[in-house]
Amino acid sequence: MVPKIHKRGKRTIGLLYYLYGPGKAEEHVDPHLVASWDHAAPDPGRDAEATYKQLQQLLDQPLVLLTDDQRAKPHVWHLSVRNGPTDRILSDEEWGDVARRMVAAAGIDDPDQGAGCRWVAVRHADDHIHILATLAREDGYRPDLDRDAVRVQAEARLLEQELGLRRLKPGDGTAAQRPTSAERHKAERQGRERTAREELRETVRRAVAGAVGEEEFFGRLAAAGLLVKTRVAPSGDLLGYKVALPDDRNKDGEPVYYPGARLAPDLSLPRIRERWSADTVPQSDVRVRPLRRPAAPATARRSTAAVAWQALLIVEQGEDGLAAAHIAAAGEVLDALAKTSAAHTRSDLQQAAWAFERASRSHVRAVRGHDRALRQAARDLVHGGPALGRGEDGASTAMAIDMLFFLITAAAHWHARKGHAQQAEAAQQAAEHLRSAYRAAAGHPLAVLHQRGRRLSRPLLQRQTAVLREAVPFLAEQVLAEEGWHALAATLADVEAAGHDPAALLADAAGRRELGTAESISDVLVWRLRRTADLPADAASLPNPAQLGTTPSTGKAQGRERRDHRRR
């Protein structure tokens, strides 16, 4: 149940005409009263003798007895209360009770405190009602509406429980504005899955991901096919922007524009500029490099995996401002990855990015600048281009998704610790979509590794089993029982052949981050080892370790030779 307090108005009759009228998209059906302040207000929807003017005069009657100084300006209070699409349809009696509870919670009319302000509740759809109230009483009393939004939200949580409706998480005012009923009906008529506002929000977020300035940002918006208008001061300074879909038009045939701030709080031009200004390296911080030129798709995904691994530690252990910045930047990475994903992972990655949008904002102020590495990863993904979904970039996509899954899960835990219920739930939803995308991306490369592992010679397989038991004795038996063990054994052999100490790297990979949320510990360790040891994510082109006939000593020599070749 979502209560929303609208901007106060000055014309009671105007709002009544809207509530009883057909609506902006002919979506209003059978408008009628379900409750009122005295249980006897005339209902123009069901009573042929009643008129809008009669109802307006009764509602505004207290104003006639007051002086100008006593009247609230504006005096029309408007609250809509909407249920979700999966909720059951409430009866008129139930909606009437909801209305009475809401006006009492807001302070408009509390029966326990005697007569209050005059109000009516109009229903013109199955899923919501509108409450109109006059902010005056005959004796000059004005209701105390401080924190009225907080109070009606709290009442909504109680009503959800009592009426058996979907129980929503308490919000903190940082969510993006919900589409109106008119916008939803318009989307249905146009055959859109999402409203114009939601499509624009997603497109603008992707345009922001990894962008370094206004020219690139607005260029991306134009390339995405949006109509863009900018607001410029007399001095020539850019003050803001608004966007529209080319085919979303009003009754006069004009495009319907939305300012960035109406799409989401962090999409206003000043908030976007905060990201760009933080991309300049402070002179005092010589360790941080400026945004660099983008890399190829596979390289960009490996870089994303490495950066996500480092960001995870900051979200888990860093200061709140730094954690909030990295969580916000993780949203940019998800947007960029979804934009450049292959067909078999695209839907789940888009859903993950869409869900995580809510988790990227809170009242904790993000300290921008330290999240530069994640923003660079988003930029590399965008400029590196789309992945083909096979070979090295397909395998490195699985590696990146695996690392991002743990980062997003850490974000969910951080929000939960801070009491950010909506953000924590959104991050958990994003993590589940990432889990599904990972299964699609990892299937083929892990199957290749599995076959390599099964072809290992018996002595080599026994050696990797000993390495596992030495490095992670508390996990060894569980890993050996997993289907992915052979893929991990092949990776350990590759690590050894590359000149690394497999036991040391495995102990580090298992010990530095939690594994409790992993479906397969073997899979997670495979990607962590291949990233740490700089091994190809796609092992199809590598020779079978059993065919190499390597020993630990010859493997180390080959690893040194490869590293020397890279330096040259």
Image (cartoon, grey):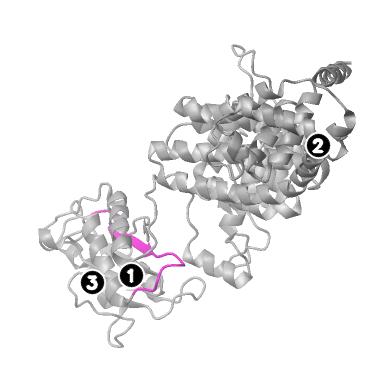
Q: Distance from label 1 to label 2 (Cα)?
A: 82 Å
Question: In this image, 176 relative to 290: left or right?
Answer: left
Crowdedness near tag 3: few (<14), some (14–19) or many (≥20) residues, C-alpha within 10 Å? many
Q: Is residue 238 visible?
A: no
Q: Earlier in the sequence, mark 1 or mark 2?
A: 1
Q: Could you tell me the amino acid type at mark 1?
A: Ile
Considering the numbered disc 3 on the image, is that residue within a helix, a strand or a loop?
A: strand
Query: Residue 379 occupies which quadrant of the picture?
Result: top right
Question: In this image, 5 relative to 241: left or right?
Answer: left
Residue under the point 14% across and 63% down: 111
Q: Is residue 280 above or below residue 162?
A: above
* Residue sitting nearer the eye, 386 or 531: 531
Q: Is residue 86 magenta?
A: yes
The residue beneath circle 2 is 456
The residue beneath circle 1 is 13
Start and end of the magenta stretch? 72-90
Give the numbered dot on residue 36. Answer: 3
Q: Could you tell me the amino acid type at mark 3?
A: Ser
Position of the N terminus, as image quadrant, is: bottom left
